[in-house]
Amino acid sequence: MGSEVIEGDVAFDLLWTRNGSVFADEVKSGMFGIELGEQRLEAQVGAQADVGRNTWGDSFLGVRPVVLGSMFASKTIKEKDFVRTKP
């Protein structure tokens, strides 16, 4: 769907569609302080998940955090690492 897509009061870094579903990647490419950074990231992707559900309904699968700036914070993204929208 695009990059830096603004919906409501949040921005989605990358927004994807596939087979009628919508999902987002939140990319963090700078230095990432583990504790404070994780709290901020959790709040950000939580807000994105809420807006995504309100905008795209059941088509919205969730938000996938992608942390590039720290080898200690980066990980392989698995299904369980998605921040799911609230039903």
Image: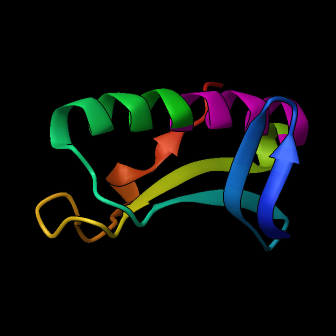
Looking at the rendered structure, the number of numbered marks drawn on it comes to 0
Q: Residue at x 18, y 33 (%)?
A: 35
Name which residue lies at 39% across and 59% down: 79
Q: Give the image quarter of residue 19.
A: bottom right
Residue 64, percent from left and from top = 49, 56
Q: Is 41 colored magenta in this rendering?
A: no
Please report the residue visible at 35 percent of the width from the left and 52 percent of the height from the top. 81
Quick one: 32 or 51, which is closer to the camera? 32
Instruction: Give the vertical position of 50 relative to 26 (above or below).
Output: above
Left or right of 67 on screen, residue 21: right
Magenta residues: mostly which secondary structure?
helix
Quarter-wise, where is residue 16 in the image? bottom right
The question of residue 50 being in magenta is answered with yes
Q: Residue 7 is drawn in which quadrant?
A: top right
* Vertical order, 64 against 1 (above or below): above
Asked whether, in this view, residue 13 is left or right of residue 69, the answer is right
Residue located farthest toward the front when viewing the structure as drawn: 31
Residue 6 position within the rendered picture, expressed as x and y whole percent measured from the top left: 85, 47
Rendered location of residue 86, percent (x, y) = 61, 25
Residue located farthest toward the left when viewing the structure as drawn: 72
Say which residue appears at 56% left-offset and 49% top-offset. 63
Q: How is the image coloured?
A: rainbow
Give the position of the C terminus as an image quadrant: top right
Q: Which portion, as a residue range, is magenta? A: 45-56
> x and y percent of residue 12 in the render?
70, 52
Q: Quadrant of the N terminus?
A: bottom right
